[in-house]
Amino acid sequence: MTLQQRIDTIVNLLDAKKAEEIEVFDLADTDYIAQTVVLANSLGGKHTTALLDHLKNDLKPHGEEFLHTDETDDWVVADLGDIIIHIMTPAYRQRYSLEEFLGELKRGFQ
């Protein structure tokens, strides 16, 4: 699978499981630790970790390897090497403003 196909699969899986405000940041031309970052909102609480469980179950049969995950009910980070997935409650997403950071990072390398 190409990188874009992998990203599309992740976005589609998150969308199907009711994740909200899904955004994809292409950081291939930056010195960030991953080529792509996917951000998504959970509906809150256990939905955050449930979304990660769905991704693991649905992506592993396609050969996707989860190198590391860090999980709380409010924020999950999954490292797939060239793709990092952040799933957060809306309050955490607003508090940490990753969109701003990633957008500035991308603009700094254009």
Image (cartoon, rainbow, N blue to C red):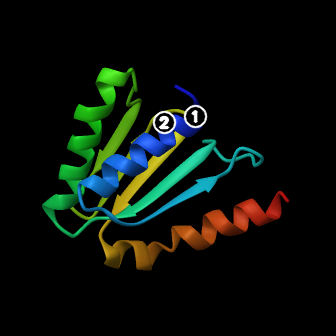
Please report the residue visible at 26 percent of the width from the left and 65 percent of the height from the top: 74
| Image position of 11 with respect to 18: above or below | above
Which label belongs to residue 16? Answer: none
Q: Position of residue 46 (x, y in %)?
A: 14, 60
Left or right, 18 with respect to 95, comes to: left
Q: Position of residue 78 (x, y in %)?
A: 39, 43
Q: Residue furthest right?
A: 110
Cβ atoms at labels 1 and 2 below 8 Å apart: yes
Query: Few, some or many C-alpha atoms within 10 Å of disc 1 (few <14, some 14-19, many ≥20)?
Result: few
Rounded to the nearest whole Å, what is the CA distance between mark 1 and mark 2? 5 Å
Query: Which of the two residues, 10 or 75, is positioned nearer the viewer here?
Result: 10
Query: Which of the two residues, 22 or 46, is positioned nearer the viewer here?
Result: 22
| Image position of 29 with respect to 18: above or below | above
Which label belongs to residue 6? Answer: 2
Query: Few, some or many C-alpha atoms within 10 Å of disc 2 (few <14, some 14-19, many ≥20)?
Result: some
Query: Which of the two residues, 9 or 36, is positioned nearer the viewer here?
Result: 9
SS for callout 2? helix
> Residue type at mark 1?
Leu
Quadrant location of residue 104? Answer: bottom right
Please report the residue visible at 33 percent of the width from the left and 75 percent of the height from the top: 90
> Residue type at mark 2?
Arg
